[in-house]
Amino acid sequence: MKTKKIIALMLSLAMVLGVAAACTDDGNGETPAATNGTTPAATEQATDASEDADASVAESDVVADASAYTELAIADVTDEGDKVLLYGWNDEFPGLVTNYSSVEFDQEITESNTYQTKLDQVLASGEDAPDIFVTDAEWTKKYINSDNTLAVNDLGIAYSELSDMYNYTLQVAADDNNVIKGLCWQATPCGIFYNKTVAQETLGVSEPEDVAPFFASWDAVLETARTVNEVSGGEKKIVAGIDDIGNAFKFNANRSQGWVTNGQVTIDPVFEDYFEIGKTFKDEGLTFEAGAWGAEWYAGMENQTVLSYWGPMWLSDFCMNMGADGTNPTKGDWGLVLGPCDFYWGGTWMMASKYCDMKASVAQIMRDIALNPDTLDTLARTGACSFVNSYSIMSGLANDPTYGIDYLGGQNAAAVLFEKANDIDMSPLGINDQQIWSEFSNVFNSYLSGEITTVADAEDTFIANVQELGIV
């Protein structure tokens, strides 16, 4: 692995020297109102963080190791149909294919709430089934562990081509036989985006190194929430709603066990902490109780009433940076620090359906989007996907003193998050996680409202509800 690390670093240095920052579309076929940009000179904070990342690169063992997965015979593939049929739930994936691949395709876009239903129907019948489709991390395993999807080896893709990917993205894509069946172009380590003006007004500091201690532990987060609320007279809050903090538990990167262990429903200790923290935030009125994706939640990104939003770079790229009307007036007034725990959120995996008769073209799409270093470097530098699934590119950006994010006032986000991507472990992920979390959320909210009065009762109710679903 030392050899791989040396090669990765050499590649990243070559890319930094040879690739200039570019402007491109936002994945939807439109020119973005704001992109990352490469600042003329890094801020002092970015340089310090970059030096920290440089010191840790040599210690990390995160590049994908093909020997950890079961590789099948590499197929010699051709196209037997007329044109690739692509399925997705928004314009991002087809936009990427349009802009970064020469493969022609037809598309079927289904609204996200009904996407899985549609996909399940066509995969069951074969009628109008896609050649290639995409899934979200939360329910990728459902399709990986089915006979409806093909191994990447069946598309002619060898594991040696995947050696620069973050290993956790292959953990997600490996089925129960440890065969890789999907590829992802992005990685999603999370941090905390905070508004500098709000931080200065309520905490008395605004620079990342000064703000970081206020989010360094759950005790610190709680005290910060109280301080923000008290100093502002309740007009400002640490987060818009409890959902923002909930993602740090839901997508915790260091869980010791999955929701189902040896046929039994299990509750990892990290979720027990969530009951206590959530109840405190609720009882003390420490949020605006704004639900994620709602108008009030989005408004806090622009009106400087919310101190922080928790998530990966795509949250900043596609939600916070752009704003409601295409440009956020608070652009440049945000910083990024790490949170009290390691967590991830999202990621999009491409996989071929068993009905695919355009295997050569589907393989080309996967290579063009997830494996082409020019594509990935452009996505990372322009904000179309600021944290890509390439160890060498992200290590290069983390150690590049000229790289910075305009939205973050020139801060080098890669330097902050680089090591966190290394720490993600997705081995506890299961095929029913989305359904199980829905049940957990229902019980959690009942506990917050007082309908369920004790944590023990909440846990018992949750276990019983999951058992009634027939999952275990």
Image (cartoon, rainbow, N blue to C red):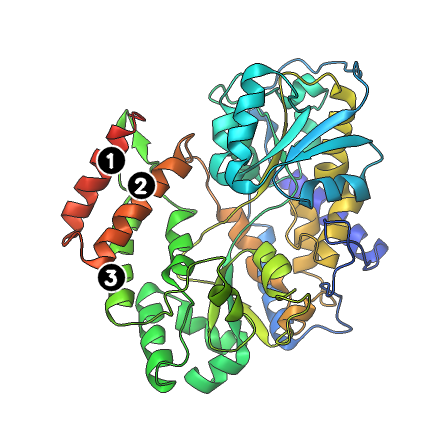
Taking the spot 77% from the left edge, 15% from the top edge, the residue there is 77
Residue 30 in the image: x percent, y percent?
Answer: 77, 54
Location of mark 1 (residue): 465
Q: Quadrant of residue 207?
A: bottom right
How far separated are the C-alphas under marks 3 and 2?
Answer: 18 Å
Q: Amino acid at mark 2?
A: Glu
Q: Amino acid at mark 1?
A: Asn
Q: In the rendered view of the protein, which quadrant contains the N terminus?
A: top right
Location of mark 2 (residue): 439
Residue 375 in the image: x percent, y percent?
Answer: 77, 45
Q: State yes or no: discs 2 and 1 in contact (Cβ < 8 Å).
A: yes
Q: Nearer the viewer, mark 1 or mark 3?
A: 1
For residue 279, which numbered disc appears in the image?
Answer: 3
Whether residue 117 is situated above or below residue 222 in the rendered picture: above
- Give the secondary structure at mark 2: helix
Q: Quadrant of residue 266?
A: top left
Residue 112 in the image: x percent, y percent?
Answer: 55, 41
Count up the numbered dots: 3
Whether residue 153 is situated above or below residue 137 in the rendered picture: above
Q: Going from the N terminus, do you reach mark 3 or mark 2 first?
A: 3
Front residue of this view, candidates 254 and 188: 188
Q: Amino acid at mark 3?
A: Lys
Q: Left or right? Give the position of 467 relative to 334.
A: left
